Image: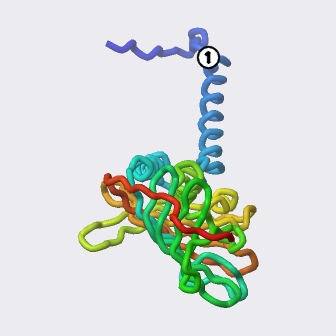
């Protein structure tokens, strides 16, 4: 039962009331410290982002894991079908229009290459093996050794190298974000966008501006197989951006690629 309230008569001494005890300093200090810590945490969350500068709600680690899986699938394959192409290069520029063929991770490549040089398009059958590139055109009866760098084109075999070739971009992409879904036949593909340092892109296309940033979009199947990728940026300097589309397909059937039997000098 609660205590009765104390009644004071006029003839009696004034009632004594219990003084209100102030909140102790230690308790008050702990409360203030907790509030300050919470505010500081909120400010930090509001003012800083993740290392990838991704948009809100983007799980960059999950996206990177998918790209890692796609790279491993390609790098572990016996044979890789390669297509690297653009619709055009800037006027007056020598550069790669397309490289399409098959290769292995020795690395070696056999296929067809088109380059733009001197205002004309040059097509050639190409074999690249053991660090040497051989090309045969419609006007040459035999394969000639060529220096692809002189045409601002890559060594086609290098495109399949696991460390410095096309698949390296899958683990060198910054600012990852998940994009829109798209359909390719029966497959629903997930887009992953990001940016690539020019220092990485120049290992694929030697003329790419090393200090620039390149936009990249990957399309992945539900099984994390890379369907294609597009890279856009200053591949040939100047203010004109060029877009290359990359397609890679894998096979468990090995392919043997050897240097042509009849060759001539460069």
Instruction: State which quadrant residue 129 falls in.
Output: bottom right
Quadrant in which the N terminus appears: top left
Please say if 218 is above or below 253.
below
Q: Which residue is mark 1?
A: 21
Please say if 166 is above or below 31.
below
Residue situated in front as seen by the camera: 64 or 155? 155
Q: Is residue 119 left or right of residue 160?
A: right
Residue situated in front as seen by the camera: 258 or 248? 258
Instruction: State which quadrant residue 2 falls in.
Output: top left
Q: Is residue 189 visible?
A: yes
Of helix, strand and loop, which one carries label 1?
Answer: loop
Residue located at (67% from left, 62% from top): 202
Q: Position of residue 41 (x, y in %)?
A: 61, 39
Residue located at (71% from left, 82% from top): 93
Residue located at (73% from left, 62% from top): 210
Residue located at (32% from left, 52% from top): 252
Residue situated in front as seen by the camera: 108 or 53? 108
Residue lying furthest front: 262
Q: Position of residue 103 (x, y in %)?
A: 45, 59
Q: Is residue 191 visible?
A: no
Quadrant in which the C terminus appears: bottom right
């Amino acid at each position: 039962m609660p205590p009765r309230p104390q009644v004071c008569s006029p003839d009696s001494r004034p009632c004594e009331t219990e003084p209100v005890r102030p909140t102790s300093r230690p308790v008050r200090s702990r409360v203030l410290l907790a509030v300050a810590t919470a505010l500081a945490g909120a400010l930090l969350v509001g003012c800083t982002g993740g290392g990838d500068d991704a948009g809100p709600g983007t799980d960059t680690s999950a996206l990177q894991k998918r790209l890692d899986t796609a790279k491993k699938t390609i790098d572990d394959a016996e044979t890789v079908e390669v297509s690297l192409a653009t619709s055009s290069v800037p006027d007056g520029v020598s550069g790669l229009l397309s490289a399409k063929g098959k290769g292995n991770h020795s690395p070696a490549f056999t296929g067809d290459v088109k380059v733009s040089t001197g205002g004309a398009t040059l097509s050639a059958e190409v074999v690249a093996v053991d660090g040497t590139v051989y090309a045969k055109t419609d006007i040459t009866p035999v394969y000639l050794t060529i220096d692809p760098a002189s045409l601002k084109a890559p060594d086609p075999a290098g495109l399949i190298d696991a460390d410095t070739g096309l698949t390296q971009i899958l683990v060198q992409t910054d600012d990852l974000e998940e994009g829109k879904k798209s359909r390719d036949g029966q497959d629903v593909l997930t887009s992953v966008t990001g940016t690539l340092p020019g220092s990485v892109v120049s290992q694929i296309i030697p003329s790419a501006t090393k200090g620039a940033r390149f936009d990249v979009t990957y399309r992945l199947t539900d099984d994390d197989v890379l369907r294609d990728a597009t890279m856009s940026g200053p591949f040939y300097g100047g203010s004109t951006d060029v877009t290359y589309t990359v397609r890679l397909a894998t096979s468990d059937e090995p392919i043997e690629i050897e240097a042509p039997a009849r060759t001539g000098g460069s």
